[in-house]
Amino acid sequence: MTNGKRDFDKDAQSWDENPVRRELGEAVGKAIVEALPLKNSDAVLDYGAGTGLVSLALRQRVSRVLAADSSHGMLDVLGGKIRAAGIANIQPVFLDLEDPARTPPTVDAIVSSMTLHHVRDPLIPRQGAGSGRNQPWRLAFGATKPSPAG
C-alpha cells in the first residue's frame, strides 16, 4: 500500500491468478448484463475496470466500453487482453475520479465492481452518466465486504 492505498500497479500482473477474484468479476459482469437495461448503441463506463473482467462481459452488449482505472498496471494487463483477443470496442482509459482536474466521459451507463470501497466519495462516478443526453442515466455497482485476498 502507498499513502494508505493498495498498490494495484504492483499487483496487476498476478491479479487474475486468484480464482476468487476471477470468478467474482465474471459473476458480477454476468449479473450486470442480465440486470441493467443496456442497448447495443450504449457507451458504458466501467469505473475501476482493473484487468477488465466486467468490461469483457459487457462488450458484446454495447457499442463501446470505456474501461477506466487509476492503475496504469491494471490498464496494461487489460490492454494485453484486448490486443490478444482483437477486441475493438473496449478502450482502456486512465481516470482517477478523485482528481479534481478530471473530466468524466459522457456515457449512457456506469458500472463498477469492487471499487467504491476505495473511493472517498462513492457518488463521484455518477457525474459522467447521461451528461448532455436527453435520457436518464443508469448505474450498476457490485461490491462485497473486502476480504484478506483483496
Image (tube, rainbow, N blue to C red):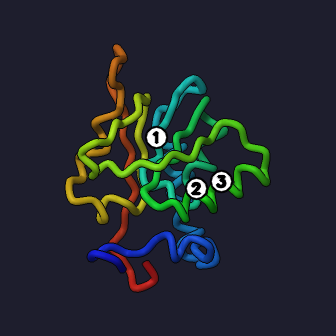
Q: Would you place residue 119 above or below residue 130 in this image?
A: below
Tag 3 near tag 2, CB within 8 Å = no
Given the current orientation, which residue lies at the most extreme front position?
101
Q: Amino acid at mark 2?
A: Gly
**Is disc 1 placed on a helix, strand or loop?**
strand
Task: Identify the mark nearer the N-term, 1 or 3.
Answer: 1
How far across and down, in percent of the image, does residue 33 sit? 54, 43
Q: Would you place residue 89 above or below residue 53 in this image?
A: above
Q: Amino acid at mark 1?
A: Leu
Query: At 34% from the left edge and 14% from the top edge, which residue is drawn?
Result: 134
Q: Would you place residue 7 above or below residue 57 in this image?
A: below
Given the current orientation, which residue lies at the most extreme bottom position?
148
Residue identifier under label 3: 79
How far across and down, in percent of the image, does residue 137 sit? 34, 29
Residue identifier under label 1: 45
- Left or right, 122 with respect to 80, comes to left
How far across and down, in percent of the image, does residue 99 sit? 28, 50
Residue 82's tag is none
Q: Amino acid at mark 3?
A: Gly
Per the model, the C-alpha gap separating discs 1 and 3 is 16 Å
Query: At 65% from the left edge and 36% from the top edge, which residue is drawn?
Result: 89
Most foreground residue, 95 or 58? 95
Q: Quadrant of residue 111?
A: top left
Query: At 54% from the left edge and 62% from the top edge, which residue is drawn?
Result: 74
Between marks 1 and 3 in the image, the one whose residue lies nearer the viewer? 3
**Is disc 2 placed on a helix, strand or loop?**
loop
Residue identifier under label 2: 52
- Left or right, 42 with respect to 105, comes to right
